[in-house]
Amino acid sequence: MEKENKVLPYLMMLPSILLMSLVVIYPIIMGVITSFQQQESGGYGFENYRYFFENDYHTTGIWYTLKIVVITVVAAIAISYLLAIFLRFSNTPISRLMGKLYILPRFIPALVAVNGMITVIRDSGLINRISQVFGYNLHLNMMYDEKGIILMNLWFNIPFATMMISAALSAINDSEVEAMRDVSASKTMIFTNLILPLTYRDVFVAATFIFMSNISSFTTPYLMGATYPKMMGVTLFDLYNNFHYGRAAALSVIMFLFSSVAASIYIYINMRKDKWEVGR
Amino acid sequence: MKLQVKNVEKLYGNGDGIRDINLDIEEGELLTLLGPSGCGKSTILRTLGGFISIDKGQILIDGKEVHNLPPEKRSTAMVFQSYNLWPHMTIFENLAFGLKIKKVPKAEMSKRIENMLKLVGMIDHIKKYPTQLSGGQQQRIAIARALLLEPTVLLLDEPFSALDAKIRVQMREELKQIQQSLNMTVVFVTHDQEEAMAVSDRIVVMNKGVIEQIGSPTEIYDNPTTRYVATFIGEMNFLKNTDGTTLAVRPEDVVINADNADTSIEGIIKTIMILGHYTSISMEVGDTTVHAYVPRLKANKFSINDKVSISFIKYYTYN
Ligand SMILES: Nc1ncnc2c1ncn2[C@@H]1O[C@H](COP(=O)(O)OP(=O)(O)OP(=O)(O)O)[C@@H](O)[C@H]1O
Ligand SMILES: [Mg+2]
């Protein structure tokens, strides 16, 4: 009887373990193997990796990707933090309305949103035409440029980050804030001494999520980005289309490594408990 | 006059709130707001602390208008009904935060915190976090935190509600002592009439957002001006008069006489309970029950189902 009980849980997990191995672990292993297969000189080696780091075109692309992602993370978190604080602590009709609406962008399919944004910001787009009504001819110069991509990334990531930070803020009691005001703490002090320490973890988690989902983004840079430099997701697509499977695999591994840096930060933050949280 | 409240009104969107609030609180006075849940006690306290704005009227501290000032600019300190210790700070840090803002020197700060923690019996917990304390202990820390700021007016919203009966009695005695030794002005909220009677200089009895009566505990007990106050404070028997008014009498003011005595009210004894030095006797009078507290020796001559007649030492009539 006892022996059965020990085996049974593993038996029940077997189907999902098999499925996981088949669709996740196997492709990853194959991908890593492929990335070391040398097309030109044969055998196994770092040829495919060297290709990316010895080629200005590609190093630029990698730096370009990192730059866009970092700007996206910082801007999205900053804006979302402010928005979430506004939604949590302001009790006006406007804040209540915004509290209902801010999540809407999440419900618009990515392609539709990107196309919509293009028709608004392109040089012959809506904003340009509105400016013409007032006698200007405003060119935003956002298309085929990192500005457009970042704007689009913010559209996708602000609602998500706001939602996460809002959840953390809702755990702060009104009376905890009021007690700080009661002892004459300024707004800045309330932020640094109460709000920040109670929410920084969720802010970091949101940041790592945004980083991971944007490092490999494709749709936005493909539709809005320039022909040079390209974000890594678009380069990957090009490599596949040109049958450079070894290089594509190597680039995937590089992207995976970037993500795993963020993932380890995420895991570290989640594992780490502050002393005051024990027993909470 | 330390604190004056003049014609204050605060109504929430749904029509609940407080109206026509007038209070004059002397320096060093402990004033209690007493009333059932939802009658507006916390609302009054929060207007005094500056956490909600008022729709009408004035609030003055030391003769100066404060009702437009935010909490950080008022010399009040509040202990909230819910626990409001900062969870990520130790007990020491919780107490130190306000003193740091006041720029109290480090050595003095530690000394004051330690003394205060000794006063509330929590010195052993100085390094703990709020979640490592029981509800009652957290409330003591919250009180200590407010006291440390030496406010000119201390606002306490049901500070003892999480404590068990014994510590509660102990804590309110301590509070009274601290309040008297510091000559602090305190507005204290409770829905426990016994607690109100025990600690207050004056009691404000509230009903659905308005003040029903203000007076010293004895005044409120001996002369409840409305039927509502009579119901709320102490025990009271109510009897319908033939003219439609209600007669109210306290159990200790009911005198039980052997039958045939010359009173108009007759009853039949239903229960006799010995409660220490006095006896509680309940009687059926018409279609209501009347309770009487009788000294134990006098109660000895009665037994269940005796027919008796009753008279009152003192009674009140309400419409
Ligand atoms: N922010 C608010 N919005 C709307 N109504 C409110 C608000 N705060 C309190 N009320 C209402 O105002 C009335 C008075 O509330 P208050 O908190 O002052 O009562 P209380 O006497 O302190 O009750 P308790 O003993 O339960 O703490 C209640 O009917 C309550 O529902
Ligand atoms: Mg209350």
Image: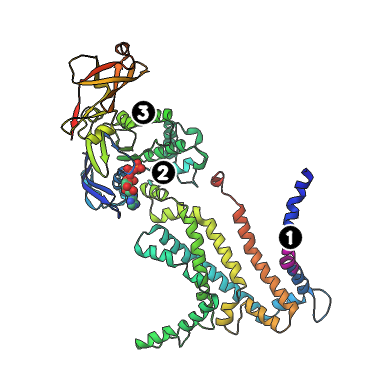
Residue B82, numbered circle? 2
**Horizontal arrangement in the rendering, residue B102 relative to residue A73 (left or right):** left
Q: Quadrant of the N terminus of chain B?
A: top left
The residue beneath circle 1 is A15
Tag in front: 2 or 3: 2
Query: Mark 3 belongs to which amino acid?
Result: Glu
Task: State the extent of the magenta-drawn residues as a range.
Answer: A18-26
Residue A211, numbered circle? none
Residue B27 visible, this orientation: no
Please tell me how crowded label 1 is: few (under 14), some (14-19), or many (20+) other residues with Cα within 10 Å. few
Residue B147 visible, this orientation: yes
Helix, strand or loop for disc 3: helix
The residue beneath circle 3 is B173
Asked if the residue at label 2 sits under 8 Å from ligand 2, the reply is no
Q: Residue at x 29, y 17 (%)?
A: B294
Cα separation between marks 2 and 1 = 49 Å
